[in-house]
Image (cartoon, helix red, strand yellow):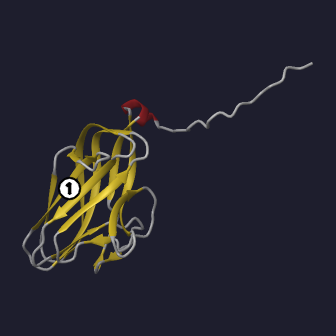
Amino acid sequence: MGITRRYRGLPEQNLASYDFYDLATGTGYKTFLGIDTNTGAATKVYRLITNAYYPASGYTGYAAAIDVDFDLALEVPMTIDGNLFFNVVYGYDGAAADRTANVKFYHVNAAGTETQIGASWSLTIGGADTANTITSGLANIPLTRFKAGETFRMSITADDAAATVRIYSDPMNRTSLGGHTLTTSQLKVLLPIKL
């Protein structure tokens, strides 16, 4: 008589794949795209997502100061450390006076308290009728641990006066938005995630 085998329900194992570079450095890069979308009643929110998806408008700012937070809400713990890369695409119409935009990154705890991580990064938006300018930035992020329920935040602020400044955030990467012809309309963030 054979021995009865009993198979107990075991949880599925998570499968992860890393290339040699990831393993050698202990860091894997994940690309996130900025998006503006509506939550109802025309209430616009800004998020970081991983898939191409149509936004509400694909840009923010129109003859007004810009102050937007692109959030990545985390359901599991995550640790980031190292060089974070990002692209910001903007358009500029109107007066020739330079405008200034600032990019900052935050750890936001479950209570909503922001703690800046890394240094502030500034860019000058200048010249009349700049149709398509892509800024590539690098921010060194110190070892930062996020718990489940916390948020990684990319904050962009820009002053304005007589000019019209637009920050683009279109994951679908359309080449004509907000009256500008664009090479790209994607806002990108490459996060250095510790393995």
Residue 45 placement (x, y as % from top left): 33, 65
Instruction: Please give the count of numbered marks on the rendered protein.
Output: 1
Residue 184 seen in the current view? no
Residue 79 placement (x, y as % from top left): 35, 38
Above or below, 173 relative to 3: below
Q: Residue at x 33, y 57 (%)?
A: 188
Q: Residue at x 43, y 32 (%)?
A: 23
Quarter of the picture containing the N terminus is top right
Above or below, 20 relative to 42: above
Residue placed most toward the observer, 147 or 119: 147
SS for callout 1: strand
Q: Residue at x 20, y 43 (%)?
A: 118
Q: Which residue is labeled 1 in the image?
A: 103
Residue 153 placement (x, y as % from top left): 29, 52
- Density class for disc 1 (Cα within 10 Å; few <14, some 14-19, many ≥20) is many
Residue placed most toward the observer, 119 or 185: 119
Which residue extends farthest right? Answer: 1
Left or right of 133? Residue 45 is right
Residue placed most toward the observer, 70 or 169: 70
Which residue extends farthest front? Answer: 111
Q: Residue at x 43, y 70 (%)?
A: 54
Residue 106 placement (x, y as % from top left): 24, 48
Which residue extends farthest left? Answer: 97
Left or right of 145? Residue 159 is left
Q: Amino acid at mark 1?
A: Val
Above or below, 27 relative to 170: above
Q: Quadrant of residue 102?
A: bottom left
